[in-house]
Amino acid sequence: MKKPDYHIIDPLIEPLVKAFITEFGSHSSMK
């Protein structure tokens, strides 16, 4: 069962997830 959609979405969501984690970590650090 291959999922080509994942291969297309992965590179798009990766930077979003990274930015979200970075921002979340920044807020956590400030606390």
Image: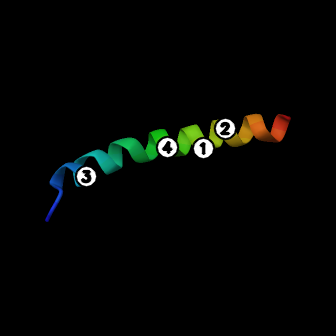
- Who's the residue at 49% across and 43% down the image? 17
Give the residue type at disc 1.
Ile
Label 2 with label 4: CB-CB less than 8 Å: no
Residue labelled with disc 4: 17
Label 2 with label 1: CB-CB less than 8 Å: yes
Q: Quadrant of the N terminus?
A: bottom left
Query: Nearer the N terminus, badge 2 or badge 3?
Result: 3
Q: What SS does tag 2 mark? A: helix
Q: What SS does tag 4 mark? A: helix
Give the residue type at disc 3.
Tyr
Residue labelled with disc 2: 24
Give the residue type at disc 2.
Phe
Distance, label 2 to label 1, CA atoms, is: 5 Å
8 relative to 3, above or below: above
Give the residue type at disc 4.
Val
Q: Position of residue 4 (x, y in %)?
A: 16, 55
Image check: 30 left or right of 21?
right
Image check: 29 left or right of 2?
right
1 relative to 28, above or below: below
Q: Position of residue 10 (x, y in %)?
A: 33, 50
Distance, label 1 to label 4, CA atoms, is: 6 Å
Q: Residue furthest bottom?
A: 1
10 relative to 16, above or below: below
Q: Residue furthest right?
A: 31
Label 1 with label 4: CB-CB less than 8 Å: yes
